[in-house]
Image: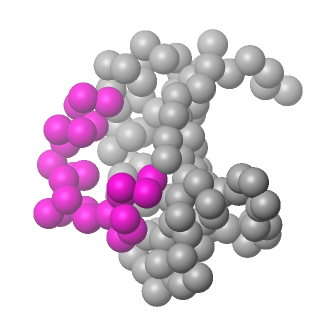
């Protein structure tokens, strides 16, 4: 069964184009190691919550936008084998492809697909 890594980040609005470039370059690396799909989404209609929200989760500042991303893998096993290789790949090292956002406020997790229609 497929496996998904999901991410939410707060990206400075001024860094939108840098983020897109960063994401495209990183996506190539993920796909080289077996990812089936990499999707990056710039928040367009992301309501503020009273208890929880994407913005609250990443401590979004007024000059930032919430970004939602996911990577689709064939299986958790493929993802687990790929991740150490991805993290070691020179193309995603901070000095080569720095994150254009505060990585300390990035939230992420791995998810087993249970419905896919």
Give the image quarter of residue 104: bottom left
Report x, y in % for residue 35: 46, 33
Looking at the image, residue 62 sits to the left or right of residue 15; the answer is right
Would residue 32 be visible to someone looking at this image? yes
Q: Nearer the viewer, residue 24 or 16?
A: 16
In the image as oriented, which residue stretches furthest toward the right?
Answer: 117
Report x, y in % for residue 52: 71, 53
Q: Nearer the viewer, residue 6 or 58?
A: 58
Work out which quarter of the rendered image holds the N terminus and state it. top right
In magenta stretch: residue 90: yes
Give the image quarter of residue 88: top left
Looking at the image, residue 93 sits to the left or right of residue 82; the answer is left
> Is residue 59 positioned above or below 92 on the image?
below
Looking at the image, residue 12 sits to the left or right of residue 32; the answer is right
Residue at horizontal 24%, vertical 39%? 87
> Is residue 29 positioned above or below 93 on the image?
above
Residue at horizontal 43%, vertical 13%? 77
Report x, y in % for residue 2: 61, 20
Figure disc tally: 0
> Is residue 64 positioned above or below 87 on the image?
below
Give the image quarter of residue 23: bottom left
In magenta stretch: residue 96: yes
Report x, y in % for residue 36: 53, 33
Looking at the image, residue 67 sits to the left or right of residue 100; the answer is right
The magenta span reads 83-106
Residue at horizontal 19%, vertical 42%? 89
- The colour mode here is one colour
Would residue 71 be visible to someone looking at this image? no
Work out which quarter of the rendered image holds the C terminus and state it. top right
Residue at horizontal 25%, vertical 62%? 97
């Amino acid at each position: 069964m497929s496996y998904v890594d999901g991410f939410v980040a707060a990206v400075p609005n001024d860094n939108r184009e840098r983020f897109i470039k960063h994401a495209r370059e990183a996506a190539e690396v993920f796909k080289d190691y077996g990812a089936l799909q990499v999707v990056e989404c710039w928040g367009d209609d992301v309501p503020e919550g009273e208890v929880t929200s994407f913005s609250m989760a990443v401590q979004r500042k007024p000059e930032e936008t919430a970004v939602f991303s996911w990577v689709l893998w064939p299986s958790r096993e493929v993802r687990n084998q790929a991740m150490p290789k991805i993290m070691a790949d020179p193309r995603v090292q901070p000095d080569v492809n720095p994150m254009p956002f505060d990585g300390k406020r990035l939230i992420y997790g791995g998810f087993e697909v249970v419905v896919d229609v």
